Each structure stands twice: as structure tokens, then as C-alpha cells.
Amino acid sequence: MFREAWGTKAPEKEAEFNDFLEENRMCISMELVTAVLGDHGQRPLDDYVVVTAVTELGNSKPKFYSTSELIAFCRKWRLPTNHVWLFSTRRSVTSFFAAFDALCEEGIATSVCKALDEVADISVPGSKDHVKVQGEILEGLVARIVSSQSAREMENVMKDHPPPPCDGANLDLGLSLRDICASHRSNEKQQMRALLSSVGPSFCPSDLDWFGDESHPKNADKSVITKFLQSQPVDYSTSKLQEMVRLMKEKRLPVAFKCYHNFHRANDISSDNLFYKLVVHVHSDSGFRRYQKEMRHTPSLWPLYRGFFVDINLFKSNKGNDLMALKSIDNAVKDASENDGQRGNDGLADDDANLMIKLKFLTYKLRTFLIRNGLSVLFKEGPAAYKTYYLRQMKIWGTSDGKQKEICKMLDEWAAYIRRKCGNDQLSSSTYLSEAEPFLEQYAKQSPRNQILIGSAGNLVRTEDFLAIVDGDLDEEGDIVKEGVTPATPEPAVNQAVHKDEGLIVFFPGIPGCAKSALCKELLNSPGGFGDDRPVHTLMGDLVKGKYWPKVADERRKKPQSIMLADKNAPNEDVWRQIEDMCRRTRASAVPIVAESEGTDTNPYSLDALAVFIFRVLQRVNHPGKLDKASINAGYVLLMFYHLYEGKNRKEFESELIERFGSLVKMPLLKIDRNPIPDPVKSVLEEGIDLFSLHSRRHGRLESTKGTYAAEWTKWEKQLRDTLVANSEYLNYIQVPFESAVHQVREELIRIAKGEYKPPSSEKTKHGSIVFAAINLPATQVHSLLETLAAAHPTVRSFLEGKEKRIQEKLERCHVTLAHKRSHGVAAVASYGQHLNREVPIELTEFIYNDKMAALTAHVGSVDGETIISKNEWPHVTLWTAEGVTAKEANTLPQLYLEGKASCLVIDPPVSVSGPLEFF
């Protein structure tokens, strides 16, 4: 990159740039687009890099450069940047989102860039042409809210910092990334060493960070973090970092802290002077949500990022000599904190400035999420499970029905093709495009519709020539926890009434102690069953020998029209998938029953609900599953079930169940007006959760009576029992009476069986992409106008006779088209975004018709003083077309009238109607 930008000056500039970064404590974040790290989307035609963020630590809070500052910085140092568009008015902002909605299902680089160039207030082209270096498949866009001064700042930057020259364009730049990787394919470490060596001494003076020092272990002791938190900070930045780490530790956020020895400072190390590198890595997005919640309470917290690297120096002071120095440092830290607080630099001055949205295109998603991520499902579970997987993904994305049908056809062909070619040997996700790209290219050639669906295919780069030979598949985001969804049925299992010739499975995504067995017993014995004549029976998990769910499936096959109460906890997606598969194979619907709870930030069950569950279990005697007061590890077992739900808050948990099964029944558990959970109960549960985390990290699912922490578990189990007994009055009082809970659940189940149940909204946006903008008109008013015209004009009455049914169908969706994506372009459609859902007045002035079609001439009014101008030459309302005549042909009616091939009736006075401006 530097050689291409600076030519012969590159080594000198590399050294200067590196010194500049060190001196100013800066970080450059880049996106590396390459084919050497494994496949996703489409292999780039050439490897390239773009700078995505510039940060400087300075002496206070980390500062992220604004977009205009980033471009100025990059142009000064000749660093490559991405294409940037700025939208600074309401019109351009609404047009941007409308443009994305119009392009989301078929956008490629050329069409997206063209549309955004047309609607943006400022467009700053990228240093590299996406089509030339990557290709037409565009992963997506990132939208970020910026300050209102951004437009002026961007204009100044573009004026003061023109695109830099490329002094090395005609020089031999040496071996490329792919050349180096191809020359060292047999050994990944050799490949890494060769790459680091080629970078040069300025950026990489040694490879110690990657390979360490053979005389010392690479990883440092875990106690470094504890020592770091206990140490006296010598500057403000260190104190703020300690505050961040301490909070993440205390709140048990899903964050990894990895410490390494800093081999660059090996000559400075002594027993009183230690140097480390700390890597902080946030594994799950739930960590950000929880941290941001803390930031609202403590605005002075530094913001959290996905990952960052810190050089740490721990040293001991001379007790006598340095006492005053340490006091001075302590005061300096306090002063810096107070000064920043007064200047307002330390708080989040504007929450909106931190909002970002990822907007991805379907042409990319089908390649990455539907083809690549579906490989394991296809090869391990077969085509039926794969179909379930990709249908569920598209349902979550809100893909339009038309696109879903097209993708289903394509993916079914892909599944048959690749299984036929590979047999049972799973295709590697690192190199899957070697097979997928030629398939997509051939599929696209079959029809223009297929070409639009695929977007672009062909020009295959052979990644096998330079991808290092390593064990296992690679993922472009390393060890970040994927938060994607697991396969599920494409449609909810309960939509209307449960048909009498179908069965019903009632199941429990719960925890031992949630009262499922007691509830099943009551439902089984309740008079009248579920309000119909289908038999109700139950299968208790604790009494079933062998695998439970296959036994349920056997019962379903024997009694397909029955209602099955599945008396066993169904705690995770694996079980839910089995239930969905059972529903599909045995023509049944499924209804989850969950104990009602507010949950926590990362678990659908709150601590007071967990306390009640454990309390109930410890009151049991002679339990069939041997989980009762006699169980020495009952608390551990409950914590194990509790952690099976970790990672979803209550809203996410309920939404997923509703999306999968179409319904959800909540069983009342705790009284609304209860007092908060007593501190001793909360503390003992939190101690148990911490102990469980330690135990599971070291021993996995090993029983608590075994392993390193066996003594701690014994002590905790006794403390748990003593604490719950001491608070038994509270735990009994806060529970909703069981009879009331049973009654409410039974009533809900009867409503579902009758089809009277309406599931809560899962807050999904309307499906599909935008095709056209139009004003939606009230059918009753237009119909009334036609009746008036027919009564006053016999020729009109004669014309309308016999066409009532077809006209009524048209009137149900009558509208005035303003712009169509195919005819007028994406930008034209998107330009109406600022008036979305606003009421627009219209005057209907003429009725033009012939033996093939009929329409009303429409004069569109204004909103807030701005006239809404249709891109159609003749704005109109199509009323009727004969069989085989498309609605688009109604555009020709005015010309046909001039040619004497159509009749026209002037409506005098004009009839005024109005309707909302909408996207369709």
C-alpha cells in the first residue's frame, strides 16, 4: 500500500508514519479484503485494504476521528479510504434509506453506488474502485449518525485535501500478498514469517509478538489482571482502563482478557519491573448492551470496543522515596478526571453519535449465510434440514415472497448438485466458492431473472493456490461468538385454529422447579380437556428410559390427532429443532409454555425466578428424577439448566419462540407487587453463578462433586440451603397461587386450539424491497365516484356493466404511481422518502376508457407547500384492464384518446380525494 502510494519514498514514509503513530498514541483500523483468509461473499479480484477508523488516545478519552477528519488524515499520508456518502438534509437522509430498501434484495456495487451518488449531498469516491478490485458483489453499507457540521467540514476537507497522487503506480511493488502465501502454502508459520518479513523493519521490527521468545513462555500468568487492577495508576488513561476492566470483571461480561509477555522489553525486565501485552476481546454482542447500560448510569466510563491491545508496565516503587511522587500522581489523575468532567469530554455528550447500522445486501447474504453457513446443516443433517435452515433465515430477514421462491429454487438445485458431487465429504467453508461460483455462474445464465438474483458470478480466483494448509475451517471473524440463529421451521406452527385432524404438542422451555409436571397433571385431569374432543395425554421425562423426544415422536405417530403434554424441560435450540421436525413429520402444531419472568440482560429468567425454582426443588421428596432435597448437588444442576439459556434476554427469548412456533403461553410465577429479592439470596446465587463459570471453564460438564472446586461446591450447596430456608417466608409469599396460574394457562391453550389466539408482535418490518412509490387511495371514495358517473352518463353505465368484479379487485389496491424502480430508477423512487406516510391531496379530473382498459386522470397536490411531482408523464388511477392487458399499458390511454381510439369524460367539478404516500 505504501509502496504504491509513495513510490521510492515508501521506506522513509513508513518510518515517519510509524514514529508519528507511536508518539501520538494512535491506532489505525483497517479492513483487509483478501482471498487468502478463506471465502465469504465473493473472492476479491485483487487484495486491498481500506482505513475504517483512526483513533488517538492522547492524554484523556480515546477520540475517534470524524469521517471528514479520517479522510483528511488518510489523504495526508496517502492511505486508502472507502467510498463515503454524506446525507445532511431530511430529504437526502430519507432518500438514502428508501434507496437501500429498494436495492436490498438485488443491489450490486454499480447500481448501489449510482443510486447513492444521485441522492447524497456529498459523495467522496473510494481510493479503490470496488468493481475493479472486489467485484460486483457488495457486502453492505454502514450508516452512522454524524454532527450537523459534517457537511461544511467535508467540503473543506475535499477542497484542502484533494486525492493524493500514486507515485508507485508504475513501479515493481515486489511480491504481492498472494505471491507470498502461494510460495509458503505447506506451512502456516512459514507463511506468517514471510509476510511479516516483507512488511519491512519500520512496521515490523521483529516477529516476537507472533512467535514469542523460545526461552520464555508466550502467555503470562492470569494473575497479571488482578495485579493490574490492584496497582496504583500513574496516569489518567491507566485509571480509566482499570475502571473499565474492573467493571467488566464485576459484571461478568462475556469478555476475554489474555496476557502475553512483552518480548520487545525483554532487556528492561526485572522482578520489580514487568512488561505485558493485554488483549481485551468482547466475545458476544450482549456484552455491549450491558456495558452501555452501565454507561448510562456512569457517563464518565470510557466506551467499549470489540477488541483492543494494551501495553502494561507493572513496577514497584521505592517505599520511602516515591511516596510523595505517588501522591502527586494520584492528585494528577483526580484533577484530569475532574477537568474532563467539567469540559464535558468524559460523558457521552450525544448518544446518537454512537449509533451505527449495518445494512447488508441479499446478493451477499445468500452466498455467505445461506450457502456457506448452511454447509454443515446440508452435509450433516440433509436437504430437508437445510431447507428449514435457509427458509428460517429468509423469514428473519423479511425477504419478499417472490425472492424467497427464487432462492428456494436455486438453493434446492445447489444442494442436489453439491451433494451429488461431494457425496458425504463436507465442502470446506474456507474454499466453498471454488464450487459455488461456477454453479452460480451457470445458474445466472439460465434467465434474466436468475441473473438479477445472483447479481454477479464468474471470474473465479483460485484461492487454493495460496490458502495455507491448516486444520479445520477458518472464519473471517476469528473466535468471535456467532449470534446467528439456528435452523427452524419456516412458518409458525400455530397461525389459525389448530385443525381437528392435526395434533398439538405442548412443551416447556423451562428449568426444574417451574411446575411443569404439576401443571401437566392438572391439565390432564381438567374436565372438558382443551375445549374439543381430542384426547390429551402426557409423557413424563423422568419416567422415560432412553431418549425422550424420539419417544414423543413415536406417540405422535400412534395418535396423530391427540394433544401431547411433553413433561420435560426443553431448554435450547437443539430440542426446539427436534420439536419443529416432529411437527412437520406428524402434522402437528407446538405451543411453548414458559414461566413468566422479567429476566436479566443475558438470561430470560431473573434471579428471583431462579431462587423460587431452586426453593421448590429443595422442598421435593422422592422425586422420580432424583432431583429433590436429598440431592447433594441440586443447586449445581439448577445452575446448569439456568446457563443453558444464557445469551438471550427475555425479549429475545420470547421473540424466537414466537417466530418458531407462532404462539407462546406465559405461566404466572411471581407477584407483580413483590419486594426486591433479599440481598443474602441474591448474593448466594451470584456466588453460585461465579463458581459455575469457574467450574465449567475448567471442567466442562463434569459433576460438581468432582474436580478442582468440589470442596467449594459442597460449602456453597449448604450455604444455599441455609439462605433459602432463612428466607422461606419471602419465597413463599412472592409466588402467584398455583390454581390461578393453571387456570390462566388452560384458558390460553383453549384459545389457541380454537384459533382465537393472536401472538404478540415480533416487531418485524414489512417484508421485501421497495419497487415503486405511490399514493394509496381510499377505494370507497373512488367507487362512489364511478357510481355517480354511471348514474349521470349512460355510456359510462353501459361500459361498467359486467366489469364490476374486475374493477372491484383493482379498487382494493387503487393508487397513483409516482415513480417505479424499473422505469424511473432507484433514486427517483427514493426521493419521495421524506413524505412517506404523509397525506397527499389529489383531484380526479377525467375518466378515459376503451374496450381494453380504463383509468382516471389524477392531479397530485402538495405537502407542506411542496408540490408532489409524479415521474409518470400522465399521473392516473388504473381502474380496469381486460384479460391479458397489463396495468402498465394504461399509460397509453391519453395518446389513444388523441388518436380516436379511446373515450374521455371530463369530471366537472373535479373530485377531491386524498391518501398516504407509501412505498410498495
Image (cartoon, rainbow, N blue to C red):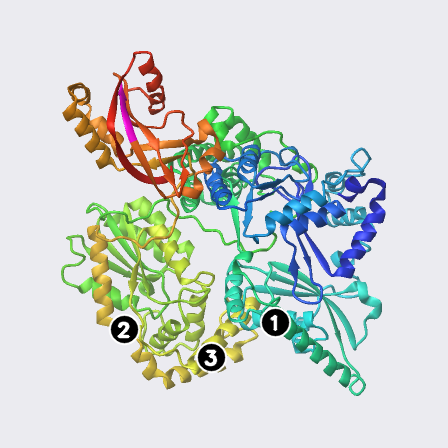
- Residue 134 circle label: none
> Horizontal and vertical percent for residue 304?
59, 63
Q: Nearer the viewer, residue 337 or 699?
A: 337
Residue at mark 1: 341
Relative placement, left or right, of 740 versus 140 is: left
- Which image quarter is the C terminus in? top left
Q: Nearer the viewer, residue 885 or 580?
A: 885
Taken as a whole, is the magenta stretch helix, strand or loop?
strand
Q: Is residue 294 on the magenta stretch?
A: no
- Tell me which numbered mark, 2 or 1, is placed earlier along the sequence: 1
- Judged from the image, the secondary structure of the residue bearing numbered disc 1 is helix
> Horizontal and vertical percent for residue 254?
55, 64
Q: Nearer the viewer, residue 312 or 385?
A: 312
Q: Nearer the viewer, mark 3 or mark 1?
A: 1
> Horizontal and vertical percent for residue 57?
69, 62
- Tell me which numbered mark, 3 or 1, is placed earlier along the sequence: 1
Task: Please say if 635 is above or below 496.
Answer: below
- What amino acid type is highlighted by mark number 1? Gly
- Judged from the image, the secondary structure of the residue bearing numbered disc 3 is helix
User: Outermost residue toward the top?
Assistant: 900
Relative placement, left or right, of 402 versus 333 is: left
- Seen at 15% across and 53% down, the residue is 532
Q: CA distance from mark 2 to mark 1?
A: 47 Å
> Horizontal and vertical percent for residue 432?
57, 38
Q: Quadrant of residue 535?
A: bottom left
- Residue 683 circle label: 3
Q: Nearer the viewer, mark 2 or mark 1?
A: 1
Residue at mark 2: 736
Relative placement, left or right, of 548 versus 129 is: left
Is residue 881 visible in the rendered image? The answer is no
Q: Is residue 845 on the magenta stretch?
A: yes
Q: Which residues are magenta?
A: 844-849
